[in-house]
Amino acid sequence: MISEFARLIDIPKEELLGKRRSQRLDNARQLLWKKMRQNGYTVTWIAELFHRTHSSVSKGIQRSQFLLETGDRLVTYWNQKTESLTLDSIDMSERKEIIEIRTPRYITRVRQMETYTFRGFSCPCCSGRGYTSVEIGKDEWRDDACAICGGTGALEADVIIQWVAKNDDRDKNNAPEVSRI
Ligand SMILES: [Zn+2]
């Protein structure tokens, strides 16, 4: 999404992600943050990507909103140019999630498994389009539903944590057991 945004408003991506400040760059960056926020990025995540504090991102988004409301010409123009940027074109390869692993407070022999589902990843196989194009003749293409994401364009990650008893033998073999449920 950042690359696409940079291309549309004709400012290098490195400049947008960089530290350098000018009114033009600030306005562009803040509009990008606002769009990212609308497309499901969290403020924390944006702050991390741009090496800014949570509050400067949050204020920047408000400022961008204000500039649009008061009809700032350049920001309004950029906003129109980048209108088509949606969740589909988010570069999800930039996305990361962190799980903190702690022993649960209550654990029983029956409930030793925890599952976490992370949603909203764009399918890398079809780039989030949901289909892949196959050439069937000269200048003739057929769109097939993507086999990886089942035509949805999105993937989810199921992370399963299984609590097991300490087992030194397993450490020696260095082969973690993977069980499918
Ligand atoms: Zn796919």
Image: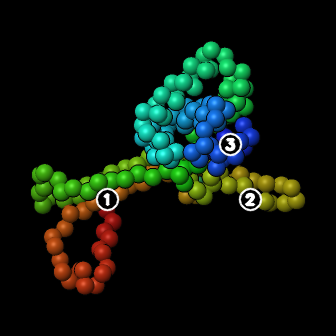
Badge 1 crowding class, 10 Å Cα cut-off, few under 14, some 14 to 19, many 20 or more, is some
Looking at the rendered structure, which numbered label has been put on residue 160? 1
Vertical arrangement, residue 69 with respect to residue 146, above or below: above
Mark 2 — residue?
134
Where in the figure is residue 47, as x and y percent of width and height? 46, 42
Secondary-structure class at tag 3: helix
Q: Is residue 117 left or right of residue 85?
A: left
Tag in front: 1 or 3: 3
Camera-nearest residue between 172 and 153: 172
Can the viewer see residue 120 in this picture?
A: no
Q: Is residue 105 left or right of residue 100?
A: left
Q: Earlier in the sequence, mark 2 or mark 1?
A: 2
The answer to whether the residue bearing label 2 lies less than 8 angstroms from the nearest atom of ligand 1 is no
Work out how far the residue at label 2 is from the one at label 1, CA to CA, in angstroms.
35 Å
Vertical arrangement, residue 163 with respect to residue 61, above or below: below
Q: Earlier in the sequence, mark 1 or mark 3?
A: 3
Residue drawn at point x = 52 percent, y = 30 percent: 60
Work out how far the residue at label 1 is from the one at label 3, CA to CA, in angstroms.
37 Å
Q: Quadrant for residue 132, please give it.
A: bottom right
Mark 3 — residue?
6
Residue drawn at point x = 65 percent, y = 45 percent: 15
Q: Quadrant for residue 139, please give it.
A: bottom right
Where in the figure is residue 93, as x and y percent of width and height? 54, 54
